[in-house]
Image (tube, rainbow, N blue to C red):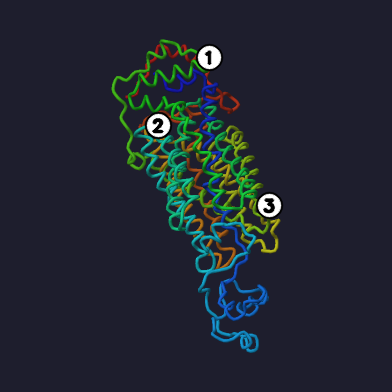
């Protein structure tokens, strides 16, 4: 019986059509880093003091330094307190200078920031002192949006198709991403960012499905990881963009408006032929397969194309199959755990960029560069060592780096940053591995549901990661100790998963043949495309989507 991979092999496993598709899927991911971690650069901490303009009523000619000296207490290091002030009194200036003020209170009239400072999220919405935690809370709200996006768009993509979900996600991200630049209140900002995050999540998991379902087995890592490389390049662009544009509203516009240029996808983005077949839409599947073959300058043998028919329509998979089927339950639980710990360490390092002691723009540029290297190297690592070993070892490496950072003194910023960069390399490569691995482990009929559930686990970790940073007030090593120990545990669990290198994708939930029997590889263990002769031999077979 012919498998769908034989049709992909006939039209070309990674021809011009697939390369064009990968380019289309890469463009949204080029813009996504701004939404994912852009807030780090619009909430940069600046010196601030309580607004003590009340003293101007009795001392209008006081200099700024004299005003601070009279109305703001100093800390143990001799610097002005940023979150407290002397309580206002109705004395004359001479009495204030002669006797001084003693009673203190929290800032009651707002804060004063450097006059040369461009408007930032921190200065406009006063995210300082008692409101400082709102920054991390808003990041958690964003991660909640990613969670909701995975929960909504994963199953929806399995139900209505990959193409419409991707188009809807692009529209939502464009509209609400630009809307963030015009919000009047911080809580509205958080709500809009949450909606943007749902769209970002939809784009990530839907691009994964299209990227894997249109290419041959040996090219799947390359297709997925090329899009991830664009995500890394987007991080480097983010560093330069945020360095050059310090006004947070202008930065939001610059980072969000280009998404509107992708509306032309309505006319050029194809649906997954594999998904169409599993839904019994055979004529539509034939049309897109023939179009792909034409662009690749290949011809699908008429006899082979004629076998693309359903005797009975494919039985749709259910979200419950992920737990009802024994072989899927194990995969689902372990991959969800892997995504969870991977997300925890990835965002733990990414959102901590301001705490490593070096210039944040330079550190972000280094993070983007090392992430690009990680995504590229992952293409070869997955091919040489397989999915299971890469996933497990990379998680272990990321965790060990964080555990070492937890023990590094605070006065060693260079050592801390170098270790963080190594950890970011491992976490990024591991994240890429998990995308490829998950797409290969879950059947087509519930692939988006499985990836969506794994992504939901990752988003729960994303919600928790900013909140874990709040534990730093008890001891600076606590957050990194948590970020490090979790991936070590997850990495060990990954050794229990089956290997899928070179295996044909499974379409239904029945389990199918073992991965080892479906491998397309040579004696070297390196994945290679099926031979042309195989297609001719399969002409006597029969494709069934039942």
Residue nearer the viewer, 312 or 113: 113
Percent position of residue 96, x then y: 61, 86
For image coordinates 59% across by 70% down, the residue present is 49
Identify the mark at residue 57; answer none if there is no mark.
none
For image coordinates 53% across by 30% down, the residue present is 22
Is residue 464 visible to us here?
Answer: yes
Is residue 346 visible to us here?
Answer: no
Residue nearer the viewer, 203 or 50: 50
Q: Is residue 396 above or below residue 290?
A: below
Horizontal side of 245 relative to 507 (left or right) equals: right
- Pointer 3: residues within 10 angstroms few (<14), some, or many (20+)? some
Alpha carbons under labels 2 and 3: distance apart: 41 Å
Give the residue at mark 2. 444
Percent position of residue 97, x then y: 65, 85
Percent position of residue 331, x then y: 43, 41
- Pointer 1: residues within 10 angstroms few (<14), some, or many (20+)? few
Alpha carbons under labels 2 and 1: distance apart: 27 Å
Label 1 SS: loop
Percent position of residue 425, x then y: 62, 45
Q: Quadrant of residue 23?
A: top right
Instruction: Tell which circle, 1 or 3, labels the residue nearer the N-terminal end.
Output: 1
The C terminus sits in image quarter: top left
Alpha carbons under labels 1 and 3: distance apart: 48 Å
Confirm or deny contact between disc 2 and disc 1 (CB under 8 A): no
Label 2 SS: helix
Give the residue at mark 1. 297
Give the residue at mark 3. 418
Instruction: Tell which circle, 2 or 1, labels the residue nearer the N-terminal end.
Output: 1
Instruction: Tell which circle, 2 or 3, labels the residue nearer the N-terminal end.
Output: 3
Confirm or deny contact between disc 2 and disc 3 (CB under 8 A): no
Residue nearer the viewer, 386 or 195: 195
**Foreground tag (2 vs 1):** 1
């Amino acid at each position: 019986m012919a498998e769908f991979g034989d049709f992909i092999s006939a039209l070309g496993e990674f021809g011009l059509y697939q390369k064009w598709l990968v380019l289309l899927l890469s463009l949204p991911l080029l813009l996504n880093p701004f939404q994912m971690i852009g807030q780090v650069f619009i909430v940069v901490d600046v010196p601030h003091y309580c607004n003590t303009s009340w003293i101007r009523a009795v001392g209008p000619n006081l200099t700024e330094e004299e005003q601070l000296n009279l109305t703001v207490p100093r800390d143990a290091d001799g610097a002005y307190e940023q979150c407290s002030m002397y309580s206002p009194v109705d004395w004359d200036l001479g009495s204030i200078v002669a006797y001084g003020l003693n009673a203190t209170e929290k800032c009651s009239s707002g804060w004063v920031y450097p006059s040369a400072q461009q408007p930032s999220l921190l200065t406009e919405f006063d995210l300082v002192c008692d409101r400082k935690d709102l920054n991390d809370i808003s990041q958690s709200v964003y991660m909640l949006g990613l969670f909701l996006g995975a929960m909504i768009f994963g199953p929806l993509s399995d139900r209505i198709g990959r193409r419409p979900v991707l188009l809807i996600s692009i529209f939502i991200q464009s509209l609400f991403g630009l809307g963030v630049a015009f919000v009047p209140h911080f809580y509205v900002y958080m709500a809009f960012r949450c909606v943007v995050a749902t769209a970002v999540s939809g784009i990530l998991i839907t691009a994964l499905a299209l990227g894997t379902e249109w290419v041959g087995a040996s090219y799947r890592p390359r297709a997925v990881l090329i899009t991830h490389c664009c995500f890394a390049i987007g991080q480097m662009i983010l560093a330069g963009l945020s360095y050059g544009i310090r006004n947070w509203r202008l930065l939001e516009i610059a980072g969000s408006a280009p998404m509107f240029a992708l509306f032309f996808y309505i006319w050029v983005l194809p649906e997954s032929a594999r998904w169409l077949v599993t839904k019994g839409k055979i004529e539509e599947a034939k049309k897109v397969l023939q179009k792909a073959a034409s662009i690749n300058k290949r011809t699908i043998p008429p006899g082979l194309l004629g076998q693309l028919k359903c005797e009975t329509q494919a039985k749709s998979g259910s979200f419950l199959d992920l737990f009802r089927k024994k072989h899927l339950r194990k995969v689902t639980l372990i991959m969800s755990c892997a995504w969870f710990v991977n997300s925890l360490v990835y965002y733990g390092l990414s959102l901590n960029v301001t705490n490593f002691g070096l210039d944040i723009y330079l550190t972000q540029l280094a993070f983007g560069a090392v992430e690009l290297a990680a995504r590229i190297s992952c293409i070869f690592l997955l091919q040489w060592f397989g999915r299971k070993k890469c996933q497990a070892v990379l998680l272990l490496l990321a965790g060990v780096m964080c555990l070492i950072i937890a023990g590094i003194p605070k006065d060693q910023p260079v050592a801390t940053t170098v270790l963080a960069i190594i950890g970011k390399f491992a976490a990024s490569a591991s994240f890429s591995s998990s995308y490829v691995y998950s797409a290969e482990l879950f059947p087509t009929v519930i692939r988006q549901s499985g990836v969506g559930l794994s992504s939901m686990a990752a988003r729960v970790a994303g919600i928790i990661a900013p909140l874990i940073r709040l534990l730093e007030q008890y001891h600076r090593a606590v957050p990194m100790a948590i970020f490090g120990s979790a991936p070590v545990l997850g990495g060990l669990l990954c050794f229990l998963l089956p290997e899928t290198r070179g295996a044909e994708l499974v379409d239904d939930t029945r389990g199918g043949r073992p991965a080892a029997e479906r491998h397309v590889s040579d004696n070297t263990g390196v994945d290679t495309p099926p031979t042309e002769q195989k297609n001719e031999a399969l002409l006597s077979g029969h494709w069934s989507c039942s």
